[in-house]
Image (spheres, rainbow, N blue to C red):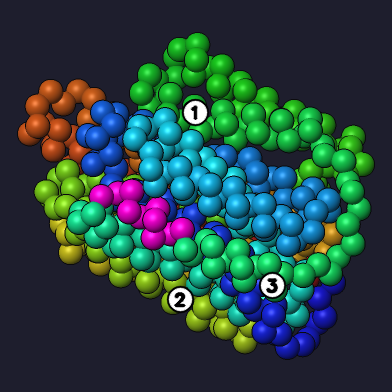
Amino acid sequence: MPKLEGKLSTRLILSVVAIGLLGFSDIMLETALNVSFPLLMTEFDVTSSTVQWLTSGVILLTSMVVILSPWLKQRFTNRSQFMVATVISIVGVLIDAVSSNFGLTLFGRLLQGIGGGVGMPLMYNVIFEQVPENKRGTMVGIGSLIISFAPAIGPAFGGYLTHNFGWRTVFWVVLPVQIGSLVIGWLTIRQVSRLTKEKLDLVGWLLLSAFFVAGIFVIERISSHGVTNMTSVALLVMMFGGIGGYLLYAPHVVNPLLNPNIFKSKIFSLSITASFITQVVNLTFNYALPMTIQMVLFQNSQVAGLTLLPGALGYALMAIISGRLYDRYGARLPIMIGLVLILIGTMMMAVLPISLYGMLFSFLVIQLGAGFWFGNNMTYAISHVPTDYQSAGNSIFTATNNYSAAVGIALAAGIISIFQKHADSADRLITATHLGATWLFRIDVFLILLAAIFSVRVLTIVNKKG
């Protein structure tokens, strides 16, 4: 257990940086490819709902790996987890750097998803296990800063490389980052908790995986075929059966993979719900803006990436600033600042006419708010559950954020595809994409208002330790 007070060692900071770089490279590739989707659709002759699997498919697999985090933490050392995850990710990067078809490209991205699925919860496990409590907000901010710089430079850098040198160049640029991360992690990551050689709860993992997999597929299926067909119904049954089955199964297991008792904490359950909804909204913008900028405003991938850059940089910088505010003033100030900014930015996106500068400024406001809100919402929630549940809480947050990101991308792709699929000419495709984006942003306003209600409710609960 971490001490209540203390200083951060250089080795501990470097270990967090090394693990963070693994998550950074995975997310940077994700955001870099997002701005290249129109190009990849043409090169591989696939639809928008298919190409989005390069992102949502990877996020889905990442979520399935993330839920293994509590077991991995008990069974393997931090350093061994990190080394294996990084090597797998490097192999995936090399595959994508030389791939010549969509299937191979997707396979390489899935390998990167496995690496990211181990790396992201591992970073927060190290922070909550080894960082003194009075420094957690700052350290979560540093970790969030590293990871959030990925979407900051990913779209702009990916757009520049794609426009001038081809989309495969992005993977060659990321390769030395992952190799550097591997070396730093090997030298600095250490183990402070005892290993128990816990047996994998395979049944629990399969039930949770069924929920995650069916949930993503059902969104894509309903958006393209509606709910009144056997496949959509079967996926819905699989989704609710998976989560329902796990909730019935887990109480009868000595050490369940993710202990559902953690949801008895109102602070945690409301915080995770708000986080899920907010991340869904956030990722709809990451998908829809580059698509709209290129297909409606006729700009290239480089411009699309640069349009997202100010917002992503704002997120990164606010993550570390808000962490310091959390340590000094508590959760209420940074969380409320974040909520207000996210609400204002989302409403601007829905109300303002679609234009390059309008979307740039609206996205900037949203991301400034997200930088204040996301890390502090997680820190506050996990700090208010019993210590024995903190690893599970970390895994649930990471899995939920990844899963909701995939839901957000699938939701955006599905809504835009509904309008696009009946467009039988180039002019009608432009109009359909414009209309689809407009309706998507209106739906986002409703969703973010719902998330804000849950988040404000968290701050009103008088509960010392969840």
Instruction: Name the mark on residue 187.
Output: 3
Q: Amino acid at mark 1?
A: Phe
Q: Amino acid at mark 3?
A: Leu
> What secondary structure is marked by label 1?
helix
Q: Quarter of the image holding residue 361? A: bottom left
> What secondary structure is marked by label 2?
helix
What is the CA distance from the residue labelled 1 to the residue labelled 3? 41 Å
Rate crowding at label 2 as few (under 14), some (14 to 19) or many (20 or more) other CA atoms within 10 Å.
many
> What secondary structure is marked by label 3?
helix
Instruction: Name the mark on residue 428.
Output: none
**Where does the image place residue 107, in percent across and percent down from the top left?**
48, 36
Residue on which the image places disc 1? 217
Point out the frontmost of discs 1 and 3. Answer: 3
**Does the magenta stretch mainly form a helix, a strand or a loop?**
helix
Asked whether, in this view, residue 43 is left or right of residue 136, the answer is: left
Q: Residue furthest top?
A: 230
Tell me whether circle 2 and circle 3 mark residues in contact (CB < 8 Å). no
> Which quadrant holds the C terminus?
bottom right
> In this picture, is 295 found above or below 369?
above
Residue drawn 79% across the image and 43% down it: 257
> In this picture, is 418 found above or below 321?
above
Instruction: Please report whichever mark, 1 or 3, sits nearer to the chain's N-terminal start.
Output: 3
What is the CA distance from the residue labelled 2 to the residue labelled 1? 34 Å
Q: Amino acid at mark 2?
A: Met
In magenta, the rendered stretch is 166-175
Instruction: Please report whichever mark, 2 or 1, sits nearer to the chain's N-terminal start.
Output: 1
**Nearer to us in this view, 119 or 84:** 84
**Nearer to us in this view, 463 or 139:** 139
Asked if residue 161 lies in the magenta stretch, the reply is no
Residue on which the image places disc 2? 318
Residue 402 shows up from this direction = no
> Which quadrant holds the N terminus?
bottom right
